[in-house]
Image (tube, rainbow, N blue to C red):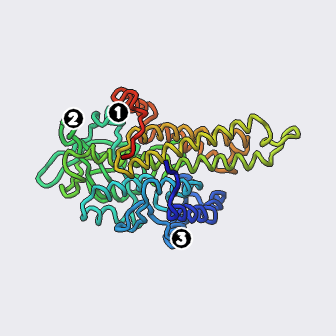
Amino acid sequence: MDFTISPEIAAYRDRIAAFVETHLIPLESDPAAYDAHENIAQDVLDEMRGRARAEGLWCLQLSPENDGAGLSKVGMAVAYEAMNRSIFGPVVFNSAAPDDGNMMVLETLGTPAQKKRWLAPIAQGEARSAFAMTEPHPGGGSDPGMMQTWARRDGDDYIVNGNKWFITGAGEAAHFMLVARTSDDVRRGHTAFLFHRDDPGWQITRRIPIMGPEEHGGHCELRFDGLRIPAENVLLGEGRGLKVTQTRLGPARLTHCMRWLGLSKRCVEIATEYAARREGFGVRLADRESVQMMLGDLAMQIEVGRLLVLKAAWEIDRGGFAQKEISMAKIHVANLLHKAADVGIQINGARGYSKDTPLEWIYRYARQARLVDGADEVHKMVLNRHLENEGTDFWHWDTAP
């Protein structure tokens, strides 16, 4: 098994690392760099995005035809980990959720006309986007079969009625991807649509307060009351909404993990630096066996997460779906991020609980990781289904020809 990376990927990693160290880490300690929702302020973001573009570090995940660098999923794993050493990193490089996942699915499934209208403005940083699928009770969450939002055909259009909530980025999005029911067919009963912020017939009813820092545009509740969408804005085809969802959410879960590994490493970095200089009762924290065990365990768990992510990325790059691999990575890395932030705070003591470091920011952000894109329990059920179907082949090695 070859775990080496290409010189091209290594060069991108090193250039990203230098950019983060020089431009982004200093911003984290500047209160003026934050907006009211504890993300990077828009004027600062615009400046940093301009620098990232100028240095050729913009939208690396897209193909050259769509103004990207064409990185493989393995390449993305390396680059995204380096980007998220800073809490501001992904959005600066246009690799943050939800735009990241939306761009990749539009690139994969969109028609040329759809790519020009809906993908290009996001890729160029001119528009933000949102993915509207989750619904309040009794609607669909992890189970799309419970979806209550309907899109009914009316001539050359579809008319949408229903509700969505916890739609990330909706408050500032211009381009929306919406999944709605178009029939009662179990497998072909959902359809994915594209619509614009200015289209009439829908509204944001509230921006839902959360414990975290927030992505730009927050997490919003939406109501659809007669939104009219032309058939040309159907993505992939009527009844193919679950295919669109699978195409988007699998890689999106994995890119979350790539980014979370970077944040986990940052927590260890802050904890290690503090433990090396902080003394108590005449002994450095770094010399205490209890602290060594905490940091050593985190180092191991981060490496386990990196291996899970790289295996899933490799499987996708070679044409597989990697559903099992992605679920394992998602469970492990989501829990790892929370643990890394918690241990970082514990070693830093009151300093870690304060806003003198980004640890408390990461800690609040980390709790959502075990919920977004499928709760831990859902992914464990998925893994059990694979185990039931595959038996001991669950752990098989592919044999080279």
Dot 2 corresponds to which residue? 186
Question: Visible in this render: residue 221?
Answer: yes
Residue 300 on image: x %, y %: 62, 40
The disc labelled 1 sits on which kind of residue? His
| Residue 41 higher or lower than 320, as above or below | below
Whole-number angstrom distance, CA of label 1 to CA of label 3:
44 Å
Dot 3 corresponds to which residue? 51
Report whether 308 appears left or right of 351.
left
Residue 122 on image: x %, y %: 38, 62
- What element does badge 3 sit on? helix
Residue at (52% x, 64% y) in the render: 7
Question: Visible in this render: residue 205?
Answer: no
In terms of sequence position, does the residue under pointer 1 or pointer 3 come before the other? 3
| Residue 56 higher or lower than 161, as above or below | below
Callout 2 crowding tier (Cα within 10 Å): few <14, some 14–19, many ≥20 = few
| Residue 73 higher or lower than 397, as above or below | below
Whole-number angstrom distance, CA of label 2 to CA of label 3:
48 Å
Report whether 397 appears left or right of 186.
right
Quadrant of the rendered structure where residue 294 is? top right
Total marks drawn? 3
Dot 1 corresponds to which residue? 137
Residue 92 on image: x %, y %: 51, 62
> Which residue occupies the extreme bottom position in the image?
54
Residue 264 on image: x %, y %: 59, 46
Residue at (54% x, 53% y) in the render: 81
